Every structure is written in structure tokens, then in C-alpha cells.
Image (tube, grey):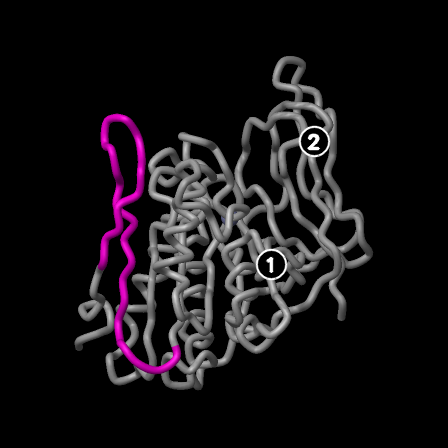
């Protein structure tokens, strides 16, 4: 069966990069030429990129050309040198790409990258879905909603929905300021469940692109309605040490009771447990966790939690 995967046309745009390579290509794929246009990006934060690219591949492979009503544009590697470094940001200027929009063609590497994405990827888009995720150190289970994107984000089908702060320096925030309907997805990351999360993201993209009118409407329903949550809180260790998870990958995207022990911090020298992380709310939605043991610095992000609104 032929799929959208075989029909993607690629364009490669030069971006100023390191001394040895001179320029690197930003690659933008597109299938279709008419109708409403949706952009799907991954790897804006480089360490989160591999999982998003895998989900985009699944979407394309599972979608027949007959289902295409509009134009689908993809940027699976939105921050090439950040991906190369397995880091959030590119090493040249270490700026957070997702705080640089609309960018500056005369600025530093990441500012130029934002300008290139603004000019070439965000051009004439009606819908933008930006795929983030846990990367190599955590697992996430939510999506950011912005005004106008309610139906889109429900179609994505993340366990939890967070209202995004109103700012125009992010890729989706800037796109929204220019009139696009947007969602930012924070699902998955390195864990035993990474393949299920990739499948869930791909299915969410398929439904959302149906809502966007870029693909035929999907008759598939999300696994469960997304639960809106209030302001998020981040649990961080007061000092460095070894983090020992108590709840693991299966608990992200679920609601746990107040006082549930989530994990511990061990002093690796004395081997004493020096801190215990517990669920702070009567019903605590787990949006992000570290599924594996890890060395952590003081102040590291260990959990993102919130109170469900229903
Ligand atoms: Zn990210």
C-alpha cells in the first residue's frame, strides 16, 4: 500500500553552523500543495527529537494519499545541532530555540534557525502541532492548549491538558499570534513504554490533522478524554544525589492520591535517604516523571504535577 511517506518532497535550507561544517541543512518536507496547511515539528529541543521523528514516520506510513485533503508540512529535525549534542539547545549559543521566535536572520545560530523556521516552515500555515516529549531522561503525558486550539488539542488525546502561558516567543505561540491554530505536545520519552507513546502520538496526530482539515476526518476516538489540570508544580531536590524512583513509567499520565511516595533522593556516599518526594494534592496528576534511577543535581526537575480540574 502506498502511503504519504513515499510522497514527501524535501527542501533543504542552509543554516550557519560550526567552523568545520560551515552550514547545516534545515530539512522541510511537504506532501500536498492545496487546501489548509498544517505544520508538524519535532526536535525543537534536540534531545526530545528522536521520539517525535519516529511518531511522524508512523503517521506518514499509516496514512494513505487518499486521506490527504490539504497540505502537510513536516520538520522532523527542527534543531539539528541540538539533536547532535543530545541536548535541549544547540552548543554554539546554547539559546533555547523555543524562546527565540520569530528569530533574527542576522543573529546567532539559534536566532537564525528560528528566523528560517518562521520564514520557511511557518509560512502560510493554518495549524501547527509541535512535538516535544521527555527525551532521554523523563516521560511526559500532557499537551499545551492555547486559545482557539481546544478541539485540536482534544484530538491529540494526551492524558492531561495544560493552559500554555500567553507568549509569542515559542514556535506555537508565535504561530498563534499570526493566526494559526496550535497545540504543543509533551508526550513520551525514553522508557519501556516509548513505543506505546509513539503510537499514541501518531494516532493523536492523525485525529488532529483530521480536525485541521488537512486529512479526512478520523473516526478513531482518543484513548480517554484529556483531563484539564490547573497550574503545574515542579518537584526538585534541595541538593544533588541519586534519585530512586518509586513510581515508574506506568504512572505518568495517571492520578495518584495525596501522600503517594513517588521517589527518593539518596546520598550516594552515606547511602542515606535524604529526601522523599510525595504527591502534594488530594488527587495529583502526574504530568512528568523520571522513570529510572539517575544522578541529579540540586534543583533538577524531577516531577511535574498538577491538580485535575474535574
Ligand atoms: Zn521541549
The answer to whether the beta carbon of the residue marked 2 is less than 8 Å from any atom of ligand 1 is no
In magenta, the rendered stretch is: 11-36
How far from the left and from the top, in percent, is residue 1?
A: 17, 77
Q: Is residue 171 magenta?
A: no
How far from the left and from the top, in percent, is residue 207?
A: 45, 77
Residue ID for mark 1 = 253
| Label located before the other in sequence (2 or 1) | 2
Q: CA distance from mark 2 to mark 1?
A: 22 Å
In the image shown, does 168 or 247 lie closer to the viewer? 168
| Residue 23 appears in the rendering | yes
Q: Would you call the spot at circle 2 few (<14 residues within 10 Å), some (14-19), or many (20 or more)?
A: many
Q: Would you call the spot at circle 1 few (<14 residues within 10 Å), some (14-19), or many (20 or more)?
A: many
How far from the left and from the top, in percent, is residue 86?
A: 40, 36
SS for callout 1 = loop
Left or right relative to 144: residue 67: left
In the image shown, does 112 or 203 lie closer to the viewer? 112
Residue at 32 percent across and 75 percent down: it is: 71
In the rendered structure, find residue 7 and report the number of the disc placed on it. Answer: none
| Residue 190 appears in the rendering | no
Residue ID for mark 2 = 237
SS for callout 2 = loop
Residue at 29 percent across and 75 percent down: it is: 63
Q: Is residue 13 magenta?
A: yes
Image quarter (top left, top right, bottom left or bottom right) of the C terminus: bottom right
Q: Which residue reaches farthest top?
A: 269
Residue 76 placement: quadrant: bottom left
Q: Which residue reaches farthest right?
A: 282
How far from the left and from the top, in percent, is residue 130?
A: 47, 59
Where 296 falls versus 28 (above or below)?
above
Left or right relative to 12: residue 272: right
Q: Which residue reaches farthest front?
A: 106
Amino acid at each position: 500500500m502506498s502511503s504519504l511517506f513515499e510522497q514527501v518532497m524535501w527542501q533543504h535550507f542552509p543554516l550557519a553552523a560550526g567552523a568545520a561544517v560551515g552550514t547545516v541543512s534545515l530539512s522541510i518536507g511537504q506532501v500536498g500543495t492545496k487546501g489548509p496547511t498544517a505544520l508538524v515539528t519535532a526536535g525543537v529541543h534536540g534531545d526530545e527529537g528522536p521520539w517525535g521523528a519516529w511518531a511522524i514516520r508512523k503517521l506518514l506510513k499509516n496514512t494513505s494519499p487518499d486521506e490527504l485533503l490539504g497540505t502537510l508540512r513536516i520538520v522532523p529535525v527542527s534543531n539539528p545541532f541540538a539533536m547532535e549534542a543530545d541536548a535541549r539547545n544547540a552548543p554554539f549559543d546554547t539559546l533555547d530555540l523555543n524562546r527565540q521566535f520569530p528569530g533574527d536572520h542576522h543573529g546567532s545560530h539559534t536566532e537564525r534557525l528560528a528566523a528560517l523556521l518562521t520564514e520557511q516552515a511557518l509560512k502560510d500555515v493554518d495549524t501547527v502541532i509541535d512535538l516535544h516529549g521527555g527525551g532521554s531522561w523523563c516521560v511526559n503525558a500532557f499537551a499545551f492548549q492555547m486559545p482557539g486550539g481546544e478541539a485540536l488539542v482534544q484530538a491529540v488525546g494526551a492524558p492531561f491538558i495544560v493552559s500554555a502561558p500567553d507568549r509569542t516567543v515559542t514556535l506555537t505561540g508565535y504561530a498563534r499570534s499570526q493566526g494559526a491554530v496550535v497545540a504543543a505536545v509533551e508526550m513520551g520519552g525514553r522508557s519501556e513504554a516509548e513505543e506505546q507513546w509513539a503510537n499514541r502520538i501518531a494516532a493523536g496526530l492523525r485525529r488532529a490533522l483530521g480536525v485541521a482539515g488537512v486529512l479526512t476526518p478520523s473516526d478513531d476516538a482518543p484513548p480517554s478524554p484529556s483531563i484539564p489540570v490547573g497550574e503545574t508544580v515542579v518537584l526538585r531536590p534541595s541538593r544533588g544525589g541519586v534519585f530512586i524512583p518509586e513510581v515508574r513509567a506506568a504512572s505518568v499520565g495517571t492520578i495518584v492520591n495525596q501522600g503517594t511516595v513517588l521517589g527518593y533522593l539518596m546520598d550516594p556516599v552515606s547511602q542515606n535517604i535524604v529526601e522523599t518526594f510525595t504527591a502534594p494534592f488530594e488527587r495529583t496528576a502526574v504530568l512528568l516523571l523520571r522513570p529510572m534511577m539517575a544522578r541529579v543535581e540540586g534543583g533538577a526537575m524531577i516531577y511535574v504535577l498538577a491538580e485535575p480540574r474535574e
